């Protein structure tokens, strides 16, 4: 995503645009990580947050591209391509969810080190991470229902259950 915020919002609002909920969830996670980055004192944590928001920015475009493939497979009435593209599209909100969960964990960990006058920004960063997680989870659940693949559903649920506890990003 290299356009302005206004251009991004125009894309989100435009009918027929592939930019939707997954991209918005990724932007929310990126905003959360960026806001927390400026608040933290620990440089290692700040670098990790920067990596997270940069990854989430890349996920904005990736979400739109993977969703476009789902729509094309649907229009072509190609069931196998639909299932494959929907699984690929599900990976994006899964990663957004994982990143948002890590940001929320880092926000809780940083709470004691952030000055009282900046606690409102910390709460804002935490709220954005929670909103991103909830949005990503809704998208994942919808995709899993469409896929109707119990094995894949179990693997995604296990993956999401461990989100936020992982060390790396």
Image (spheres, helix red, strand yellow):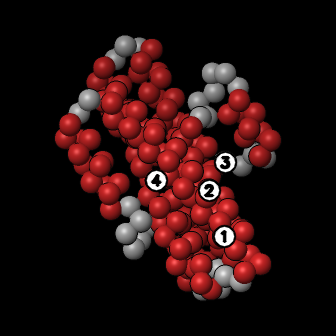
Please give the residue where the numbered disc 4 appears in the rendered image.
Answer: 97
- Secondary structure under tag 3 reads loop
Q: Residue furthest left?
A: 151
The residue positioned 44% from the left and 27% from the top of the image is: 70
Helix, strand or loop status at disc 1: helix
* Discs 1, 3 touching: Cβ within 8 Å: no
| Mark 4: secondary structure | helix
Helix, strand or loop status at disc 2: helix
Of 148 and 59, which appears nearest the observer? 148
Task: Report x, y in % for residue 44.
Answer: 55, 83
Q: Name the residue under label 1.
A: 122
Q: What residue did someone put label 3 on? A: 1
Residue at point 46% right, 53% down?
97
The residue at which mark 2 appears reads as 128
- Nearest to N terminus: mark 2 or mark 4: 4
The residue mark sitting in front, 2 or 4, is 2
Q: Nearer the viewer, mark 1 or mark 3?
A: 1
The quadrant holding residue 123 is bottom right
Crowding at dot 3, Cα within 10 Å, few <14 / some 14-19 / many 20+, comes out as some
The tag earlier along the polypeptide, 3 or 4, is 3
* Residue at x-position 57% and y-position 51%: 131
In the picture provided, is 16 more to the left or to the right than 166? right
> Considering only order in the chain, which callout, 3 or 1, is on the residue closer to the N terminus?
3
Comes first in the chain, label 3 or label 2: 3
Alpha carbon separation for disc pair 2 and 4: 12 Å
Query: In the rendered structure, are the residues bearing label 1 and label 2 in contact, judged by CB atoms less than 8 Å apart?
Result: no
Label whose residue precedes the other's in the sequence (1 or 2): 1
The local crowd at label 1, few if under 14, some if 14 to 19, many if 20 or more residues have their Cα within 10 Å, is many
Badges 1 and 4: C-beta atoms under 8 Å apart? no
């Amino acid at each position: 995503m290299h356009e302005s915020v206004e251009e991004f919002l125009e894309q989100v609002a435009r009918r027929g645009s592939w930019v939707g909920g997954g991209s918005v969830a990724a932007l929310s996670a990126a905003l959360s990580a960026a806001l927390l980055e400026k608040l933290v004192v620990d440089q290692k944590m700040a670098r990790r947050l920067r990596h997270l928001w940069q990854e989430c920015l890349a996920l904005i475009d990736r979400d739109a591209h993977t969703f476009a493939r789902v729509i094309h497979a649907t229009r072509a009435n190609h069931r196998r391509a639909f299932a494959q593209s929907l699984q690929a599209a599900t990976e994006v909100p899964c990663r957004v969810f994982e990143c948002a969960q890590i940001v929320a964990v880092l926000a809780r960990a940083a709470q004691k080190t952030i000055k009282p006058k900046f606690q409102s920004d910390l709460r804002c960063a935490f709220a954005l991470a929670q909103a991103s997680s909830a949005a990503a989870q809704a998208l994942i659940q919808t995709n899993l229902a469409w896929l109707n693949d119990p094995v894949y559903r179990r693997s995604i649920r296990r993956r999401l259950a461990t989100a936020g506890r992982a060390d790396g990003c």
